[in-house]
Image (cartoon, rainbow, N blue to C red):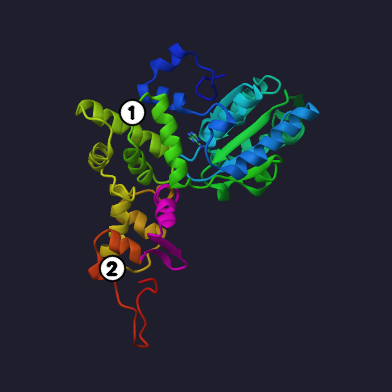
Amino acid sequence: MSSKKVKNSDKSTAEKTTNNGDSFLDQTLRPTKWEEYIGQKHIKDNVKILLRAAEERGHIPEHILFYGPPGLGKTTLAHLIAKETGKQIKITSGPAIEKVGDLASVLTNLSPGDILFIDEIHRLNKMVEEILYPAMESGVLDIIIGKGPSARTIQLDLPPFTLIAATTRVALVSSPLRSRFSGGVFRLEFYSNEEIAEIVKRSSKLLKVKLENEALKEIAQRSRFTPRTANYFLKRCRDYAQVHKKTLDQETVKGALDMLSVDGMGLNSGDRRFLETLIEKFNGRAVGLKTISAALSEEETTIEEVVEPYLIQLGLLERTARGRVATKKAYEHLGFSDKIKKPASSSQGGQNNLL
Ligand code: ADE
């Protein structure tokens, strides 16, 4: 099997250090026990019961699907489940499994009880998906040999396995596939600032970085309610403090994050450009996804999956039936208060009812 298609997660330290320092650190920061995994209480409670019950019955856990915006810890959860259950985890992704043969190879190379993690499962193609159904449901691989009238199907028994899949686009996972995640389909939520602060505190200890309390809060506040962003900012602030020979206090964090063009609400230059385009170029009108995508030369999926969820969460953007609209709060945050339209007093009505 090509090593590009599937990865065994238990790399030696030597292997890890051949990566760049950051991806090594990212693995170091991953929680290895439930107690270290902060937030997502609903998911933790349910998954812990699922795993415990399966263990007590002497069965392998049923298949699980995690979905939600990037960086919230879907992969981290899969690794954590593997650690907590003492199982091996094999990692692959939707785009890496191009052909039926790729999936057949991944499945037949599993050992009994393994966890198979498929990231971006919404990107599996139809033919591959259809091979996955009987594998998930009945633990068999249906292989078609030959073509035309002489074609026949043989069935291979697979080692028992648990599929853990992740997606940022659950609506693109077909309903037959979704329904086969008999262990549950779980949505990861954005974290609170307090939870992010706890994650940053834990990471700073692991990285042996001394971080003042106000500095911790400043990082948390700008981290888009997202652990991956928070850990990334912590590492960049550490670099900045090191090079400038400063302690990691609130001022240093502000200096480091301002240099990354991340503002006090955690908006980056792409977020601001998005909102400014709605406000200035389209004069506050509701704008369709295709139009804004063309105006920004940005992919629709990036806008929908990465940019918009955070802006909506902050109350800076609304998705209306007519399109995307920046809210009053967005106008104020970006210094466009003078452009806020007064509610129409006449029967003509305003251009948009949010402002
Ligand atoms: N890293 C990523 N997600 C995390 C979480 N929920 N708790 C602790 N560390 C994390």
In the displayed image of the protein, which residue is found farthest to the front? Answer: 213
The residue depicted at 29 percent of the width and 53 percent of the height is 272
In the displayed image of the protein, which residue is found farthest to the right? Answer: 57
Q: Is mark 1 within 8 Å of ligand 1?
A: no
Which of 188/115 is in front? 188
Which quadrant holds residue 125?
Answer: top right
The residue depicted at 60 percent of the width and 24 percent of the height is 83
Q: Which numbered circle lies on residue 85?
A: none
Instruction: Identify the element where label 2 is drawn.
Output: loop
282 lies above or below 74: below
Quarter of the image with the N terminus in it: top right
Q: Amino acid at mark 2?
A: Asn
User: The magenta stretch spans which residues?
Assistant: 303-327
Front: mark 1 or 2: 1
Residue at which label 2 appears? 283
Which quadrant holds residue 157?
Answer: top right
In this rendering, position of residue 213 left or right of residue 226? left
- Per the model, the C-alpha gap separating discs 1 and 2 is 46 Å
185 lies above or below 312: above
Disc 1: CA contacts within 10 A as few (<14), some (14-19) or many (>=20): some
Q: Earlier in the sequence, mark 1 or mark 2?
A: 1
Q: Residue 154 in the image: x percent, y percent? A: 76, 27
In this rendering, position of residue 295 left or right of residue 136? left
Quarter of the image with the C terminus in it: bottom left
In this rendering, position of residue 263 left or right of residue 50? left
Disc 2: CA contacts within 10 A as few (<14), some (14-19) or many (>=20): few
Q: Which numbered circle lies on residue 210?
A: 1
| 315 in magenta | yes
Q: Amino acid at mark 1?
A: Lys
